Image (spheres, rainbow, N blue to C red):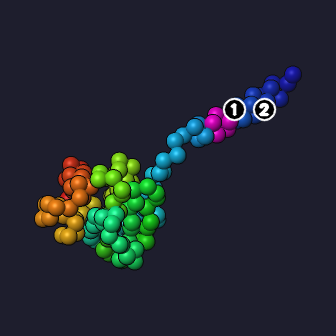
């Protein structure tokens, strides 16, 4: 057997084995919400001057057009960046706690903005969603503020 033919067969088998292995790993991966980064982060550089987070209780109605980004507890965030002010709504879930996946999604969004050159130190909590001003807000709102304080992201 010619060495070139043997090398071609080995490479073909290797590519096939790697493809099957990758497909198998994707097949057994848990079906959780996948991490989503902000779209077109290169175009956001310098375009966002202010970031405001609002906790929205699951029992209250939310007008999607009032926000640039909606972070849901059980699905991918909905992005519509527009203008220098970024309004992010963290939608509460059925549980009293902020789901870990939702926390992760929010941190990925903020780190993606930071990577695009946006100063994420300008993050503020909407005064009506701030449990430091309104202690009777749901526990998830308290967790949101605690998360942001722990990461050093609040003004």
Q: Is residue 5 visible?
A: yes
| Quarter of the figure with residue 110 | bottom left
| Along the viewing direction, whichever of 154 and 132 lies nearer the viewer | 132
Name the N-terminal-most of marks 1 and 2: 2
As drawn, the residue found furthest toward the top would be 1
Q: Please give left or right for residue 21 compared with residue 78 in the image.
A: right
Residue 2, by quadrant, is top right
Q: Which residue is mark 2?
A: 8
**Residue holding disc 1:** 17
Looking at the rendering, the stretch of residues picked out in magenta corresponds to 19-24
Residue 152 visible (yes or no): no
Q: Which residue is located at x 33 percent, y 53 percent?
A: 95
Question: Which one is nearer the viewer's eye here, 74 or 8?
Answer: 74
For the C terminus, the quadrant is bottom left
Nearest to the observer: residue 17 or residue 137 = 137
Q: Is residue 8 above or below residue 104?
A: above
Given this view, does label 1 or label 2 mark the residue nearer the observer? 1
Query: Residue 103 — which label?
Result: none
Label count reads: 2
Q: Is residue 77 left or right of residue 127?
A: right
154 within the magenta span: no
How far across and down, in percent of the image, does residue 32 sit?
A: 48, 47
The quarter in which the N terminus is drawn is top right
Q: Position of residue 44 (x, y in %)?
A: 39, 68
Residue sitting at the far right: 1
Left or right side of 142 for 33 = right
């Amino acid at each position: 057997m010619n060495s070139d033919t043997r090398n071609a067969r080995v490479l073909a088998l290797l590519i096939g084995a790697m493809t099957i292995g990758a497909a198998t790993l994707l097949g057994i991966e848990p079906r959780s919400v996948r991490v989503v980064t902000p779209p077109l982060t290169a175009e956001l550089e310098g375009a966002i001057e202010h970031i405001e987070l609002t906790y929205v209780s699951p029992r209250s109605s939310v007008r999607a057009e009032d926000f640039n980004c909606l972070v849901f507890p059980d699905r991918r965030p909905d992005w519509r960046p527009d203008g220098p002010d970024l309004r992010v709504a963290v939608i509460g879930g059925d549980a009293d706690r902020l789901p870990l996946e939702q926390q992760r999604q929010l941190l990925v969004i903020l780190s993606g903005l930071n990577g695009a050159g946006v100063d994420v130190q300008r993050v503020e909590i909407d005064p009506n969603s701030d449990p430091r001003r309104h202690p009777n807000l749901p526990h998830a709102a308290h967790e949101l503020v605690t998360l942001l304080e722990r990461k050093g992201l609040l003004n």
